[in-house]
Amino acid sequence: MPPSQTRIQRAFNLASERYAALGVDVRQALKTLATIPISLHCWQGDDVGGFENLGHELGGGLAVTGHYPGKARSPDELRADLDKTFSLIPGRHRLNLHACYGEFGNRRVDRDEIEPAHFKNWIAWARQRGLGLDFNPTYFAHPKAADGFTLSHRDKSIRRFWIEHGLRCRAIGAAMGKALGTSCVTNIWIPDGLKDTPADRRAPRERLAESLDAIFRKPISSKHNRDAVEPKLFGLGSESYVVGSHEFYLGYAITRRKLLCLDAGHYHPTETISDKITSVLQFLPEILLHVSRGVRWDSDHVVTFTDDLQAIAREIVANGYLARVHIGLDYFDASINRIAAWVIGARNLLRALLTALLEPPGIHAAEVSGDFTTRLALQEESKALPIGAVWDYHCISQNVPVGEAWLAEAQRHEREVLSQRSGSTD
C-alpha cells in the first residue's frame, strides 16, 4: 500500500534537512528535474513493427524477443498506450518516432515517398498534449536493405533510394519541429556491415560519407530540426565490420557539425558512455543520448537503476550539460508488459538525474582541494542519502503514482484494454 500524502511530506521534510546540511537545495533540484524532457521511443509499444503494412521482416541486425500479449496494432492503439505511459511518468516529455510509424491508410507508400502528411495525426496528438517529437529514418525491414547495406551500398540506385528517404525524413522532422514549436532531433542509424572479415573497409565508408553529405546538403534551421548520426560497434549479421563505426561518425559529426548519438548499448560491454560525454562535448555543441542497457551481446534491455545509468546522469548534470544533451530511451522488450517497460526505464532515468542533482557539493570541493580521502568518503556516504523520500515527493507533486502504485494502474490497463486486443500475441 503506497504511503499517504502526509507521510510523504513528512519524509520529504526530513530528507530536505539532511540534504541541506550537506549544502544541497532540494527544491531547486526538483525544479530543475521537472524541466528535463526524456524522449520515449515509440517502438517499445509494438516491438518495432510499425504501420507500413509492407510485410517486411525486421532485419537490420535487430531482434525482439518475447510474445507478451497486448501489443499495439494501430497508431490509435499505440497513442492510447503512450497516453497511459506518460500519465505514470513525472514531468513533461517527448516521443521519438520511426519513419515506419507513419499513417498510410490502405495505400502502399514506399520509404522514398513518405511526407509530413503521413504524420499529421502524430503531430496533432503531440500538440494537444504539449509534447515534442523526435524522428528517425527507417533503414531496415525493407527489400533494399535485405543484404545488409543501405547508404553505403555499392549499387548507386539503391543508395539513391535511401538518400531520398533521408531527405524526406529531414523534411518531416522539420515539419514536426515547426508545428510544435520545439526542434525535432532527426537521427540517422543504418545497419550496414558484414558478418565476416571484409576485403575492403574503405570504399563503403567513402560511399556512406558521400550519401550523408547528399542528405544534409540542404540547410534546415536548427529551430525546427537538428541532425544526428548514430554509430554502433556490431550487430547481428555485422559482427566483423560496421560501416558507421564510432570513429567514422565522430569524425563526421565534428567536421559536419552534426549531433553525435551516443547509445549506451552500442559499445563493447566493458565500455560506458559516461566517460565519453565530456570528451565529445569539447568539440561538438550538442549530442544525442540513447539510454539503453546492454547485456552481453544484446544492446537493448529495459533501463534499470545501475551504476552505469547513474554515471551517465551525473556527467550530464555535474558538468552543466543539460542544455546540450538530448536524452532519449532506446530498447525493446516483448517479454513483459510493454507499458511497464516504458515506465520502468523512464522513471529510472529520471531517478538517476535526480540523484545527480542532489549530489553534495562537498564532493567536488574536496577534489579541487586535492583531498581525495574526503572525496571518496563523501561519494560513498552519499549513496545512502534519502533520495527515495525526495523522489516520492516529486511524483506526488507531478500528480503521478508514488512508488510501485503505478504498476497497479498499468495492470488495470492491461486487464481492461490490452487483453481485449485479439491477435496481439504473435
Image (cartoon, rainbow, N blue to C red):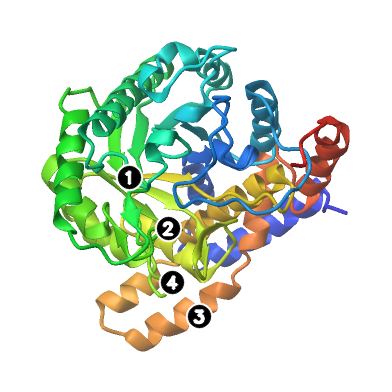
Viewer-proximal residue among 387 and 43: 43
State the CA–CA distance, disc 3 to disc 1: 48 Å
Q: Which mark is residue 380?
A: 3
**Image coordinates for residue 165, horizontal then vertical, percent:** 33, 26
State the CA–CA distance, disc 1 to disc 2: 11 Å
The residue beneath circle 2 is 237
**Image coordinates for residue 361, horizontal then vertical, percent:** 39, 66
Label 4 or label 2, whichever lies nearer to me, is: 2
The residue beneath circle 4 is 269
The residue beneath circle 1 is 149
- In terms of sequence position, does the residue under pointer 3 or pointer 1 come before the other? 1
Q: Type of residue at label 2?
A: Gly
Q: Residues within 10 Å of mark 1 (few under 14, many from 20)?
A: many
Dots 3 and 2: beta carbons under 8 Å? no
- State the image quarter where residue 235 is shown: bottom left
Q: Is residue 13 visible?
A: no
Q: Residues within 10 Å of mark 2 (few under 14, many from 20)?
A: many
Q: Secondary structure at mark 4?
A: loop
**With 85 as the anchor, is 103 left or right in this view?**
left
Q: Type of residue at label 3?
A: Glu
Viewer-proximal residue among 352 and 247: 247
- In terms of sequence position, does the residue under pointer 4 or pointer 1 come before the other? 1
Residue 25 lies, with reference to residue 222, above or below; the image says below
**Image coordinates for residue 297, horizontal then vertical, percent:** 49, 67
Residue 423 lies, with reference to residue 182, above or below; the image says below
Dots 3 and 1: beta carbons under 8 Å? no
- In terms of sequence position, does the residue under pointer 3 or pointer 4 come before the other? 4
- In terms of sequence position, does the residue under pointer 1 or pointer 2 come before the other? 1
State the CA–CA distance, disc 3 to disc 2: 42 Å
Q: Type of residue at label 4?
A: Pro
